[in-house]
Image (spheres, rainbow, N blue to C red):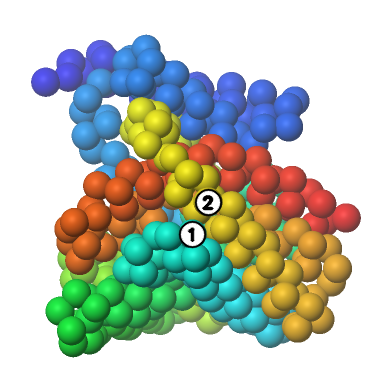
């Protein structure tokens, strides 16, 4: 049991850390996300061990609540006005960057002696990014810039392509194991994505017309959190992607709620405390001991993934006639990677039981690096991309 005083003290301390972090970030080259993660490591079990177990044991709940708001805010940026000039670039960059990363990582690892099954799985996992981290970096450095809006739109589709690629890769690997292709994983991914689309539409359509009526033009915080958590809760209950569900709902409301001055602006006012708690606890949950298991394969994976994201985004930018700044910097902005990759690795480890330990150690250790260094590179890319 955790006493109420330590519980309240921990919450207050974490929120004040967020305030201090934002202040430090304005005076250094480090983004506040990286600083929050570092603070989390410092006060977590790996160092001072100041965070009660109650918080770290409920990290998944906090992560889900945060990602629901992140999904909605990303979706609310996908308005017709914002996408009119960039729709072709969004589709081209998101698809080609995901495919290029998967192919480059898979072929590169296989060419260096990694088994074909493990190479395919790692290639698919490499396509995933970190929407929460990237959204916060855009909001911190250039929310109204063309590059920032384009980056958010691309990230909105990243999870969709990553899920599909992972499902196909898992089906191929399962087929190699037993001699027959098993497409159940692809059907599962289709159900997860399709179900999320349906839930987002079913909640978003009535919400677009019913919300914002009590205080004309501006939905209150109660309405905002209510529809976001109901949408996400239904998606989680049925096993759909709650991130995609709230993203779809956000896009529907943003495009159809003409009586809103700005759909659910209240979410932005409360999102930051959740983000602070999320990233501090994420830092506290990082197991730095896994870094000793990274080895040559891990370093190769990091290099191949970085090259795949950069070259894929650069090629897509060329083909879609994107501005030069987008071609040069979008790939770098897509490097952060977080919990989605670990979730994929856990699922894939069941299909590759004999390589379970290597797969999990590799993905967890490289995710730690991408989670700490990725935001720094994304911040550089956002600032350069605006010039």
Picture coordinates of residue 26, whole percent (x, y): 72, 30
Q: Is residue 232 left or right of residue 283?
A: left
Q: Looking at the picture, how far across and down is residue 23, in whole percent?
A: 66, 25
227 and 194: which is toward the camera: 194
Quarter of the image containing the C terminus? bottom right
Discs 2/1, front: 1
Location of residue 53 with respect to 78 vertically, above or below: above
Q: Which mark is residue 300?
A: 2
Residue pictured at 24% horizontal, 78% vertical: 176
Element assignment for label 1: loop
Please state, as top left, top right, bottom left or bottom right, where the N terminus lies in the image.
top left
- In the image, is 102 to the left or to the right of 62? right
Residue located at (24% from left, 55% from top): 355
Looking at the picture, tell me which residue is in the foreground, 82 or 173. 173
Left or right: residue 378 versus residue 122 is right
Q: Say which residue appears at 82% left-offset and 52% top-offset.
A: 384
Q: Quadrant of residue 178?
A: bottom left
Residue position marked by numbered label 1 in the rendering = 112
Q: How far separated are the C-alphas under marks 2 and 1?
A: 9 Å
């Amino acid at each position: 049991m955790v006493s109420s005083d330590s519980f309240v003290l921990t919450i207050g301390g974490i929120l004040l850390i967020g305030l201090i972090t934002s202040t430090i970030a304005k005076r250094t080259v480090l983004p506040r996300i990286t600083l929050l993660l570092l603070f989390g490591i410092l006060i977590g079990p790996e160092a001072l061990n100041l965070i009660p177990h109650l918080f770290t044991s409920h990290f998944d709940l906090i992560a889900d609540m945060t990602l629901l708001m992140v999904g909605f805010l990303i979706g609310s940026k996908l308005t017709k006005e914002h996408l009119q000039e960039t729709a072709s670039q969004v589709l081209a960059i998101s698809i080609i960057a995901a495919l290029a990363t998967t192919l480059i990582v898979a072929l590169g690892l296989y060419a260096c002696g990694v088994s074909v099954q493990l190479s395919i799985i790692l290639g698919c996992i490499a396509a995933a990014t970190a929407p929460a981290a990237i959204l916060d970096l855009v909001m911190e450095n250039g929310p109204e810039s063309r590059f920032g809006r384009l980056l958010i739109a691309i990230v909105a589709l990243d999870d969709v392509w990553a899920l599909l690629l992972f499902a196909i890769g898992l089906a191929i690997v399962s087929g190699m194991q037993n001699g027959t292709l098993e497409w159940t994983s692809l059907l599962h991914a289709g159900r997860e994505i399709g179900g999320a689309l349906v839930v987002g539409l079913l909640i978003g359509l009535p919400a677009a017309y019913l919300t914002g009526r009590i205080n004309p033009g501006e939905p209150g915080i109660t309405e905002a959190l209510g529809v976001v958590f109901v949408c996400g809760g239904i998606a989680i209950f049925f096993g759909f992607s709650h991130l995609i569900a709230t993203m779809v709902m956000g896009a529907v409301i943003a495009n159809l709620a003409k009586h809103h001055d700005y759909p659910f602006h209240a979410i932005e006012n409360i999102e930051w405390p959740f983000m602070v708690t999320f990233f501090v606890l994420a830092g506290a949950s990082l197991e730095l001991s896994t870094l000793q298991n990274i080895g040559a394969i891990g370093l190769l994976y990091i290099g191949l993934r970085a090259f795949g994201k950069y070259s894929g985004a650069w090629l897509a930018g060329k083909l879609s006639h994107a501005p030069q700044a987008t071609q040069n910097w979008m790939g770098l902005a897509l490097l952060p990677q977080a919990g989605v990759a670990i979730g994929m690795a856990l699922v894939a480890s069941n299909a590759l039981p004999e390589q379970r330990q290597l797969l999990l150690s590799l993905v967890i250790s490289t995710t730690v690096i991408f989670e700490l260094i990725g935001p720094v590179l994304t911040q550089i890319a956002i600032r350069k991309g605006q010039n």
